Image (cartoon, rainbow, N blue to C red):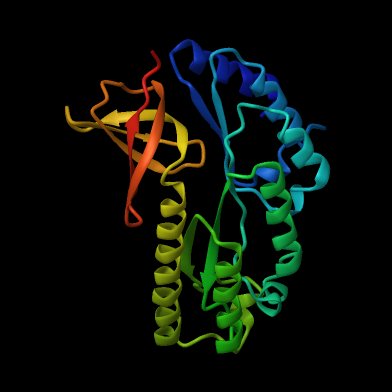
């Protein structure tokens, strides 16, 4: 899609009261390669649209997060400090077999680059377990790397054979029961890290976009970091953006907060 077309859609959304848009796609990082454009330019153009208060990015390939991309992104006040960076595995050997063109060390450098520019950002990811040839040691490395990064959220899934792929032709597939065990172990780690991230939010003041009201008692919304917050005692409605003091965390489900009303 051409940038002009995307901007026009965003303008229409803004005219109808939308405050946040998400730029997403099957391979978002490759945007524009087919017509001489690039993702950064698209983001900059969408940023100009009046009425839009927040721009969130979909899943990004680590390779796009170079120094210039981060520097230019940091100039845009509407960018949500929430970055979903595809990882797949925290083991270098596994990444090589997957034909992923980065190492854990390179990925971690990208995380540090983002955190330097966006100190309160949330880093989320996808992690696959049980890929062909994955050893116990490689799985351990993947868990340790996830812990090192301190992801705010992880989407964990188990490798499944896709006919016609190079991986499908391998003869060292992980046994189903082992893959399931690794899935549960990584999912437990994901829950632990999410709980830790939510607890780190307590005491902070955030701008929360109200998504819905489920009762007269509270409203549900999202911080720029994509943290779900339940706000009690607020009369805010859908699409309102309010200032909220985060007062607690309910495990890995959501945070709790109170609206700070300006006098």
Q: Name the residue at 71% across, 55% down.
A: 112
The image position of residue 110, as x and y in percent, is 73, 55
State the residue in front, 258 or 125: 258
Left or right for 72, reference 253: right
State the residue in front, 76 or 137: 76
State the residue in front, 60 or 248: 248
Q: Name the residue at 68% across, 29% down.
A: 43
The image position of residue 63, as x and y in percent, is 76, 53
The image quadrant of residue 89 is bottom right
Q: Is 38 located above or below residue 261 in the figure?
A: below
The image position of residue 44, as x and y in percent, is 71, 25
Q: Is 243 located above or below residue 24 in the figure?
A: above
Q: Is residue 33 visible?
A: no
Q: Name the residue at 74% across, 48% down.
A: 65
Q: Is 263 located above or below residue 152 in the figure?
A: above
Q: Name the residue at 71% across, 66% down.
A: 100
Q: Is 77 located above or below residue 83 in the figure?
A: above
Residue with the most extreme left position? 216
Quick one: quadrant of the C terminus?
top left
């Amino acid at each position: 899609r051409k940038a002009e077309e995307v901007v026009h859609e965003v303008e229409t959304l803004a005219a109808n009261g939308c405050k946040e848009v998400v730029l997403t796609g099957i391979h978002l990082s490759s945007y524009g390669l087919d017509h001489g454009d690039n993702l950064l330019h698209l983001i900059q153009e969408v940023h100009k649209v009046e009425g839009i208060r927040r721009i969130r990015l979909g899943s990004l390939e680590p390779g796009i997060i170079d120094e210039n991309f981060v520097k230019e992104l940091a100039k845009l006040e509407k960018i949500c400090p929430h970055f979903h960076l595809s990882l797949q595995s925290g083991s270098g050997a596994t990444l090589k077999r997957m034909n992923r063109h980065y190492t854990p060390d390179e990925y971690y450098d990208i995380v540090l680059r983002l955190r330097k520019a966006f100190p309160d950002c949330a880093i989320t990811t996808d992690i696959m377990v049980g890929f062909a040839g994955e050893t116990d040691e490689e799985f351990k490395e993947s868990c340790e790397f996830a812990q090192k990064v301190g992801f705010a959220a992880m989407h964990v899934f188990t490798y499944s054979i896709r006919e016609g792929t190079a991986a499908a032709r391998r003869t060292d597939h992980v046994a189903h029961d082992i893959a399931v065990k690794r899935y549960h172990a990584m999912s437990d780690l994901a829950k632990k890290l999410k709980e830790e991230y939510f607890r780190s939010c307590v005491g902070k003041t955030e701008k929360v976009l109200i998504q819905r009201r489920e009762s007269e008692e509270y409203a549900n919304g999202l911080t720029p970091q994509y943290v779900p917050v339940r706000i009690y005692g607020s009369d805010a409605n859908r699409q309102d953006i309010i200032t909220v003091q985060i007062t607690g965390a309910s495990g890995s489900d959501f945070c709790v907060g109170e609206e700070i009303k300006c006098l």
